[in-house]
Image (spheres, helix red, strand yellow):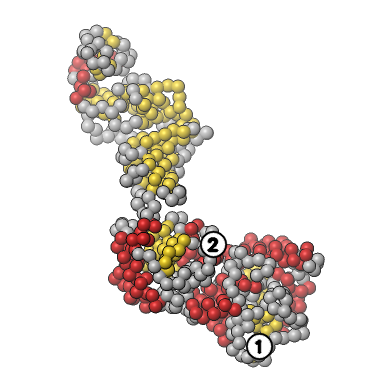
């Protein structure tokens, strides 16, 4: 299977999906005012865009959290006297792959809680008792009694401390969030970020067709979850709408010689340089001056792409560390050099070659890449 | 051997032309009814659990396995469950129960039959219970106490299980012989029947299974 180039994004909410389970059973309905007001206060504290569902103990049909305040008394009437059994809801939740914060708010023992001992669902559950314990004398899940909404919110707050994106044949080419950095470890490319306020990322990458990259999220609590990247669209290699800058005619002469590996006359020192010279060192600048003075007028990040069209030559800054060279090759820029990595499908590895990107490497018809 | 499954996902099989539930009704099955029917509430159920405490199907042992079954119900309450089960389910009468028991006692338990059942059963509680029970009975009967091969009366717990409600002449009586550790007795199911002294007395060793 070939690698394909795709655009995708990863959206991460600061807080995990919250599942409310409210107890309206015989052992709890006398405390309904406490249960309902605690729920309302907590809903008000939670982020507006948070995903969540609200269940009544013993009823596996959820309602939208946003509906709760409006229809509180109606829901109470409808669910009054349901029995304190969690299995119908947990059976439903166990079919979902999401990871939750499950809050069970009520009073009195849930008879079948023990059937879920050691389950991943119960590990994600906080029992909140407004009167009597929900687990009796057993200790199967975390439980707090008579808490304030703020205390529960503090318990729920479990920020992400690291995100790591990888996948079969995955190689990121461009990404929107500068907090992420690329590491290639034993042939696998990892895009990682830690301690960010915002982990949102748009990215363009290579991936084995039929596969999606996955993000591994690590929470402060130590919990890890895997979230797939949404593949948005396949990138077509079309002539992009580019912000192209013309070279001067003197510079064009240099370019036209250099691409044929011929020496050229330097604009700075008026001497002849080898075709692959990129900086003239015969100037007062200790770092040297780029042989194309026009580059000095623009912010150059590393890669520069030259376009030859109708005898004119243009350039464009390419502000990314990775450049796709062909179907299975990328150049990874480190400082003023870019190492070529080739993808081996057999080993599913990106292998660092001993080659660096030559100046004026042709990456497609009329397009040449140089690392400055 | 063909297996059938009721709406709770627990198995039934044919004996002498009658489809009979492999096991007495468990608490997990009964709880499905409690959730769907809304017939009984927390205090009613808590009271029932007081006389035969709930044991999780996931962790029951040789010593406490009677705790996974629903017991202590009155016949009138069982009728709500039967109505909820629908599909022609009913209590056996005394003669039917004894006929089934008599048949099952004679048939050695072939392990492949149960393996086949375990392959078909989709209910996780049902599968877990059968697996654990088989392991326990093998140890108790084959290796430790009786040192004999298992038969179908063993795995169905028609003996060394509960006293089970059956119908008899328009009334309800119990039949079966629990393990002495659960309820000391010298009953012989083919001869004896057990009559509660009071009609509305909850007896912790009385359970039931259904046939159709
Ligand atoms: Zn020069």
Q: Quadrant of the C terminus of chain A?
A: top left
Asked if one can make out residue B89 in the rendered structure from this viewpoint, the answer is: no
Q: In this image, A161 relative to B99: left or right? A: left
Q: In this image, B120 relative to A306: left or right? A: right
Name the secondary structure under disc 1: loop
Chain containing mark 1: B
Residue shown at the point (69%, 78%) measured from the top left: B183
Asked if one can make out residue A97 in the rendered structure from this viewpoint, the answer is: yes
Name the secondary structure under disc 2: loop
Q: Residue A340, percent across and down?
A: 41, 26
| Observer-nearest of B86 and B54 | B54
Q: Residue A330, percent across and down?
A: 39, 29
**C-alpha span from label 2 to label 1:** 37 Å
Residue shown at the point (70%, 65%) measured from the top left: B136
Q: Is residue A127 above or below residue A8?
A: below
Q: Is residue B105 above or below residue A14?
A: below
Is there CB contact under 8 Å for labels 2 and 1? no
Q: Is residue A307 above or below residue B49?
A: above
Give the image quarter of residue A3. top left
Q: Residue A367, percent across and down?
A: 30, 26
Residue shown at the point (60%, 76%) measured from the top left: B52
Residue shown at the point (42%, 72%) measured from the top left: A131
Q: Which residue is mark 2?
A: A117
Give the image quarter of residue B193. bottom right
Q: Which residue is mark 1?
A: B196
Binning the other alpha carbons within 10 Å of mark 2 as few (below 14), some (14 to 19) or many (20 upward) gives some
């Amino acid at each position: 299977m070939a690698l394909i180039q795709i655009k995708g994004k990863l959206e991460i909410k600061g807080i995990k999906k919250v599942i409310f389970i409210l107890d309206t059973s015989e052992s709890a309905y006398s405390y309904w005012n406490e249960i309902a007001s605690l729920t309302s206060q907590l809903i008000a504290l939670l982020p507006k865009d948070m995903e969540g569902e609200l269940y009544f103990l013993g009823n596996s049909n959820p309602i939208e959290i946003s509906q709760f305040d409006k229809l509180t008394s109606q829901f109470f009437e409808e669910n009054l006297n349901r029995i304190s059994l969690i299995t119908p809801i947990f059976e439903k939740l166990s079919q979902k792959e999401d990871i939750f914060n499950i809050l069970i708010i009520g009073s009195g023992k849930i008879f079948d809680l023990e059937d879920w001992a050691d389950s991943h669902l119960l590990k994600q559950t906080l029992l909140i008792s407004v009167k009597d314990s929900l687990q009796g004398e057993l200790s199967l899940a975390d439980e707090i009694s008579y808490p304030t909404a703020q205390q529960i919110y503090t318990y729920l707050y479990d920020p992400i401390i690291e995100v790591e994106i990888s996948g079969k044949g995955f190689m990121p080419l461009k990404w929107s969030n500068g907090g992420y950095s690329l590491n290639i470890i034993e042939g696998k490319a990892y895009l990682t970020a830690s301690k960010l306020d915002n982990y949102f990322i748009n990215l363009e990458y290579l991936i084995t067709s039929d596969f999606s990259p996955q993000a591994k999220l690590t929470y402060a609590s130590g919990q890890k979850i895997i979230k797939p990247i949404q593949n948005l669209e396949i990138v077509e290699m079309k002539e992009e709408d580019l912000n192209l800058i013309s070279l001067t005619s003197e510079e064009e002469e240099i370019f036209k010689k250099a691409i044929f590996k011929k020496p050229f006359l330097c604009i700075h020192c008026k001497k002849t340089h080898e075709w692959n010279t990129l900086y003239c060192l015969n100037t007062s600048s200790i770092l040297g001056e780029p042989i194309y003075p026009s580059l000095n007028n623009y912010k150059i990040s590393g890669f520069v792409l030259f376009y030859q069209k109708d005898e004119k030559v243009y350039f464009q800054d390419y502000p990314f560390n990775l450049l796709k060279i062909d179907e299975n090759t990328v150049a990874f820029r480190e400082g003023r050099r870019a190492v070529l990595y080739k993808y081996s499908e057999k080993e599913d590895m990106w292998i660092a070659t001993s080659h660096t990107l030559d100046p004026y490497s042709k990456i497609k018809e009329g397009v040449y890449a140089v690392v400055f | 051997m063909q297996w059938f499954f009721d709406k709770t996902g627990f198995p039934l099989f044919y004996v002498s032309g009658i489809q009979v539930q492999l096991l007495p009704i468990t608490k997990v099955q009964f709880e499905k009814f409690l959730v769907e029917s809304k017939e009984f509430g927390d205090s009613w159920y808590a009271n029932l659990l007081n006389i035969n405490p709930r044991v999780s199907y996931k962790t029951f042992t040789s010593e406490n396995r009677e705790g996974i079954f629903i017991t202590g119900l009155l016949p009138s309450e069982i009728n709500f469950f039967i109505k909820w089960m629908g599909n022609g389910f009913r209590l056996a009468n005394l003669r039917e129960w004894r006929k089934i028991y008599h048949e099952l006692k004679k048939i050695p338990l072939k392990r492949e039959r149960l393996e086949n059942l375990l392959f078909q059963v989709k209910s996780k509680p049902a599968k877990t219970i059968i697996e654990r029970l088989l392991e326990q009975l093998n140890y108790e009967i084959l290796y430790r106490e009786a040192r004999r091969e298992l038969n179908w009366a063993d795995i169905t717990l028609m003996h060394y299980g509960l006293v089970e409600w059956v119908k008899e002449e328009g009334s309800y009586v119990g039949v079966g012989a629990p393990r002495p550790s659960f309820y000391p007795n010298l009953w012989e199911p083919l001869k004896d029947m057990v009559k509660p002294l009071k009609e509305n007395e909850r007896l912790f060793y009385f359970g039931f299974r259904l046939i159709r």
